[in-house]
Image (spheres, rainbow, N blue to C red):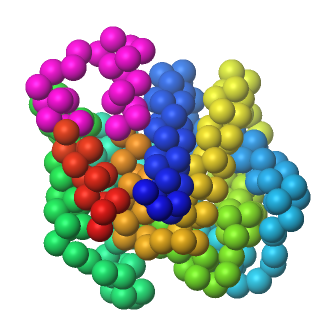
């Protein structure tokens, strides 16, 4: 297994743990825009410390790519949050997970990355795994046209964010440079949105511990992902990193005593096959 695949798998682990924090936060009555502000309050100091100790931060084109990623990610997360207000989670979340397809298509079209039959097959297996582990079944599947539009915009935006990460690395950017660039815009925008919505700086005190955990986990996920993108193709590494739902599903079974039924077993099997195919493609 080459180093770029190892880094993508590490990013997948951190994203999976981050998803668990997000789910815990949602049950505590913290609004999405508040949580984005809470998260970035810890994320920004974290990336600044990482940049200082790694001595790898430079200001230039890669930093600008990171800034554009900050704008795209905020737009994507806002639309994703809006989609959850009038759409079933069992539909919205699986659709949002498909952002890796947007990234892969952009990488193939604009960067000339190779799209083999094995990679296409792995994408199909990933989609099946997402549906089996996150959606479908005897659950609410209602969604309005507005919610569907919102989540499609969110998916496209987040797919562009991952593609921008790759562009940042191609321009010579380190993880510290690209991520700091992203945080430099995301922080004031997220804080500004929270102040605007709450008519003042009124972030919930009980949310700070979740914001701290999310900030650290997101920093780890992005650092591993962008380090991997320095070495390998986005159309392979981003899909691997985005399969973090495997970690979330395993957590539910091991720690929350969720039942491992046939549906989940097939879903896990498809996910493992997809990861194997991507690693070999």
Instruction: Name the side, left or right, on which 241 lies relative to 69.
Output: left
- The front one of 207 and 176 is 176
145 and 223: which is toward the camera: 223
What is the magenta range?
246-268
In the rendered image of this protein, does residue 273 appear above or below residue 1?
above
Q: In which quarter of the image is the N terminus?
A: bottom left
At x 46%, y 49%, the residue is 9
Q: In this view, does 67 lie above or below 171?
A: above
Q: In this view, does 102 lie to the left or right of 88?
A: right
Q: Relative to the observer, which residue lies in front, 179 or 207?
A: 179
Main SS of residues in magenta: helix
Within the magenta stretch, is there residue 83? no
- Percent position of residue 105, x then y: 31, 76
Q: Is residue 228 above or below residue 91?
A: below
User: Which residue is painted at 25% across and 45% down in the image?
Assistant: 271
**Quadrant of the snapshot with the C terminus:** bottom left
- Quadrant location of residue 226? bottom right
Query: Where residue 64 sits in the image (x, y, percent)?
Result: 69, 79
Does residue 148 appear in the picture of this structure? no
State the image coordinates of residue 255 (x, y, percent, origin top left).
42, 15
Query: Residue at 26% of width from left, 77% of height from top?
Result: 115
Q: Measuring 81% from the left and 68% from the top, which residue is drawn there? A: 56
């Amino acid at each position: 297994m080459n180093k770029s695949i190892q880094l993508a798998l590490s990013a997948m682990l951190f994203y999976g743990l981050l998803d668990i924090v997000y789910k815990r936060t949602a049950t505590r009555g913290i609004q999405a825009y508040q949580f984005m502000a809470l998260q970035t309050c810890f994320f920004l100091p974290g990336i600044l410390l990482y940049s200082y100790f790694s001595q790898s931060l430079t200001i230039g084109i890669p930093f600008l790519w990171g800034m554009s990623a900050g704008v795209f990610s905020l737009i994507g997360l806002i639309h994703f949050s809006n989609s959850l207000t009038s759409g079933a989670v069992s539909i919205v979340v699986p659709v949002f997970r498909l952002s890796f397809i947007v990234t892969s298509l952009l990488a193939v079209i604009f960067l000339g990355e190779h799209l083999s039959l094995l990679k296409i097959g792995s994408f199909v297996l990933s989609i099946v795994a997402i549906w089996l582990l996150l959606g479908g079944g005897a659950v609410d599947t209602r969604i309005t046209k507005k919610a569907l539009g919102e989540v499609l915009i969110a998916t496209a935006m987040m797919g562009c964010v991952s593609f921008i990460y790759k562009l940042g690395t191609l321009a010579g950017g380190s993880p510290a440079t690209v991520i700091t660039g992203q945080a430099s815009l995301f922080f004031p925008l997220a804080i500004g949105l929270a102040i605007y919505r709450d008519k003042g700086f009124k972030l919930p005190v009980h949310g700070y511990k979740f914001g701290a955990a999310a900030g650290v986990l997101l920093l780890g996920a992005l650092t591993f992902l962008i380090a991997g993108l320095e070495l390998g193709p986005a159309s392979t590494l981003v899909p691997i990193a985005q399969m973090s739902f495997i970690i979330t599903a395993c957590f539910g079974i091991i720690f929350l005593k969720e039942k491992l039924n046939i549906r989940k077993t097939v879903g896990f099997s498809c996910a493992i096959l997809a990861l194997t195919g991507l690693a070999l493609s």
